[in-house]
Amino acid sequence: MGNITDTEEGELEEYECESLIHMEDFLHYSLVPAVIIVIVLSCLETRTRRWGVEEKLQKLSGHGAFLIPFDFVTAFNNRWSFGFAFGSTADRLMFLFTQEYLPTNFPGWAKVFFLLLVAIEVGLSSYPFFVCLSTSNKIIGATLGFLYTATWLIVMVLDMKCPQGQLIGAYEDYIIYWPSLLCQTFLLGRFLHILVKALTANCRQDTINEETLLLEVHQAQHVQQLMRKPPVDRQSQKSWIRRKIYAWDPYFRFPSRMITTAVVILICLYMFISAEYMLSMLIIRQLKDLKSILEELVSHTNASQEMESFLIGMEEFNNVTEGVWISTTVMTSLTSISFVFRILTCYRKHIKLLRAGKKHLFMSDDYSVSPSLSVVALGKYTSWQIAFSMWGYLVIHLVLFVAGMVLMYLVILPMKHGQWMQLLNKWGLVILSLVIIMGVKQLQVLMASQFFLQQKISPNDKQKPLALDNRKAFQNFSYFLFFFSVAVGLTSCLIRLLWSIVIGAWLIGRIDRAIMPQGFERFDKGFKTWIGMLFVDHYHTNPVLVCFCYILVTNGQTDLQRVTTHMILDRPKRTAPRVSAKARTRWLLFYTLLKNPDLMKLRKKPKPDSHSVDLSQPPFAINI
């Protein structure tokens, strides 16, 4: 064999490393098994409500029910299983976030419809993960879920087998997408556990009862706690973590939706931060390579003093940019991760305030969300929270990076280069003016506290009462303060604007707090989604309301069972005849009109029909 050139060797390696299947192609192919799994599980599910077509199709009797992938309202069980199921779809969520699937030269007005089709495709390909977890047919559901998840896992590993990363080369996809692989591995174990448990119960002829209860245990305990005597305040006996950070509540449990949201946000944040860090390091590396190329060109030519200064400044810029970017990446990552746990804390706090009737503590009294918008908000909360968290991380990172670069070039680098006098001449007057203004403001507060307020009523009071003293001196003080406040009002206005920008950018990723001022919360769509979701949870999972309904249902079922047992105790069992819903409704209408003839005058008169029956003149006599 002849010698192989470098170009041919590179082409050979590229050919050998070519993946057998790509994830985008498999996403389209996976729709076929996904639809088959959905149809099989739907045919196995039973319905309590019968359809009219079942009179002709006897084999369809009671089957063909709708599947529930995930209970967004009252689910408190299998929280981590559904959380990892959503986590396994994080790579597809990032695929939707980047919008790389949009074809080129596609009309702008049609991109929304194309996005809707792609979202439906992604949702349908992920549908079997959830219906196999929630189906009542545990053996078949666990088997199909295990096979479908294993197929996805194998395809992802095969797609990432070839080191074809454009940013850091080999194992780039493993570094970014290992959380999705971990979640799918967990799902494999979960489906295997369900299958073994179901087979064991089937062999022992046991019944597995995993239905969602109307009243959860923690809800019943919460109601029992409300009926007890309030405990003595033991705030001082709590640890520092429970007093300052988080206090565990044994009578509160986060729903599956919130746990799922937290898991998916953490996974998506990791993927986004990893991809952003790799891209930024690639750009910094290219800047360093550009600087090396310029140095080589300068070394072969007679470079001027300005060119050498430019190269020195460029090297300093690269070092400063790399240091500031890495430090701000760490700070923003920790901030975004803390926001995830802060969202869970605010959810518990706001739900408790709603239960106590104190919604004014986190929203305006006149602020309301319509029931239809609340239902929509419940469905889109998780997706909006993920998107807001991604954009929040990006905005905070850019703001911190710009602030860090400004601080480095205006303060740190001049100090490093020994330019203390130039720095003092440039910013000394501004800093001194701000210090004087802040000192005068504190002096005003001190004077008001010492001379213009009356003494404490009790020595144990922390502050003086709001009662004026020395009124004549206070009037003169207010008069001259008026002219001084006008002079420094511009500075206060700029500081207020600066703080609004900083706080707005800092809280852009948190939709549990309104970034609009009070009275304008309706313009904050994210906060509106949060409030709508809270109201749906409050009305459907309030422990007092659920406990009351549970008592009504259980007492009603007990009375009905007692009466039914007494009536059919000595009767032989027989199969009830099949009656259509339409015939039953007509019979009830006929019977009601016979019992209440006066209602016939209030009914809308039907159009004359040869087959219609005049209920006012029954064809047979009935003794009432």
Image: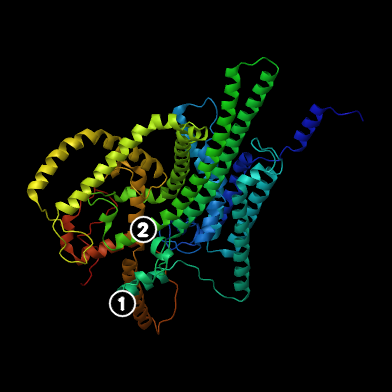
Q: Where is residue 230 shown, x and y percent of the image?
A: 29, 74
What amino acid does circle 1 point to? Arg
Mark identifier at residue 461 = none
In percent of the image, x 60 and y 58: which residue is there?
Answer: 186
Using residue 271 as the reference point, say whether residue 550 is left or right of it. Answer: left
Q: Please, which residue is most extreme toward the right here?
A: 1
Mark identifier at residue 228 = 1
- Spatial CA distance of label 2 from label 1 is 25 Å
Q: Nearer the viewer, residue 112 or 16?
A: 16
Q: Where is residue 51 shown, x and y percent of the image?
A: 43, 57
Using residue 591 as the reference point, say whether residue 135 is left or right of it. Answer: right
In percent of the image, x 58 and y 43: which residue is there?
Answer: 274
Please name the residue that numbered disc 2 is placed on.
537
Q: Where is residue 583 shown, x and y percent of the image?
A: 35, 60
In percent of the image, x 55 and y 27: which residue is there?
Answer: 104
Image position of 287 with respect to 87: above or below:
above
Q: Residues within 10 Å of mark 2 (few under 14, many from 20)?
A: some
* Residue 534 location, quadrant: bottom left
Q: Where is residue 145 shown, x and y percent of the image?
A: 60, 57
Q: Secondary structure at mark 1?
A: loop
Q: Secondary structure at mark 2?
A: helix
